[in-house]
Image (cartoon, rainbow, N blue to C red):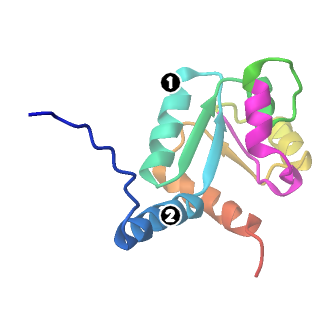
Amino acid sequence: MKSENIVQDRQPQPQEEEEIMQQEEEEEQRFHVLAVDDSVIDRKLLEKLLKASSYQVTCVESGEKALEYLGLLHHSSPASSSSQHHHQGSSWKDVPVVVMSSENVPSRISMCLEGGAEEFMLKPLQLSDLHKIQAHLLKSLPHS
């Protein structure tokens, strides 16, 4: 007997297409948070808290890496060109910035808020603090 390899170009069934579209919509509805912290422990804690609250999270270890991810820092490395591709054409002035620090220094807090930060939170962050972040994210949504 001769065996044949049959390759089918299987089209997704309507139910599968609907499930795929629903998953994509859910991904789009989740807020994407870029978490920047030089402490790996604080980054992991923040990532865990945000993911537990159904946020999509990208963590980086420095302001420079954050700017690279956003496509606002131009280097010739492949990483920066790919991040520019993902974020090209976005308006960053409407992106809410929340500053978190373990240092409760009034002059630093004032400087951050005057510089455009929406909120200044003291570390360690708690799950209940995420409600403050969500309020700022909701304000940033386009009004329909």
Q: Residue at x 81, y 32 (%)?
A: 67
Residue 88 within the magenta-colored segment of the rendering: yes
Q: Amino acid at mark 2?
A: Glu
Please state the horizontal and vertical placement of residue 51, each as a whole percent of the image: 46, 47
Q: Earlier in the sequence, mark 1 or mark 2?
A: 2
For residue 87, what is the image quadrant? Answer: top right
Judge left or right: residue 48 versus residue 136.
left
Q: Is residue 90 visible?
A: yes
Residue 11 within the magenta-colored segment of the rendering: no
Residue bearing the label numbered 2: 26
Between residue 76 and residue 29, name the one nearer to us. Answer: 76
**Image quarter of the N terminus:** top left
Vertical arrangement, residue 81 with respect to residue 29, above or below: above
Q: Amino acid at mark 1?
A: Ile
Between residue 26 and residue 4, name the one nearer to us. Answer: 4
Vertical arrangement, residue 139 with respect to residue 126, above or below: below
Please state the horizontal and vertical placement of residue 3, each as a whole percent of the image: 16, 34
Please state the horizontal and vertical placement of residue 41, each as a whole percent of the image: 50, 24
Residue range corresponding to the magenta coloring: 80-101
Judge left or right: residue 80 versus residue 111.
left
Spatial separation of the CA atoms under disc 1 and disc 2: 29 Å
Q: Is residue 105 visible?
A: no
Residue bearing the label numbered 1: 41
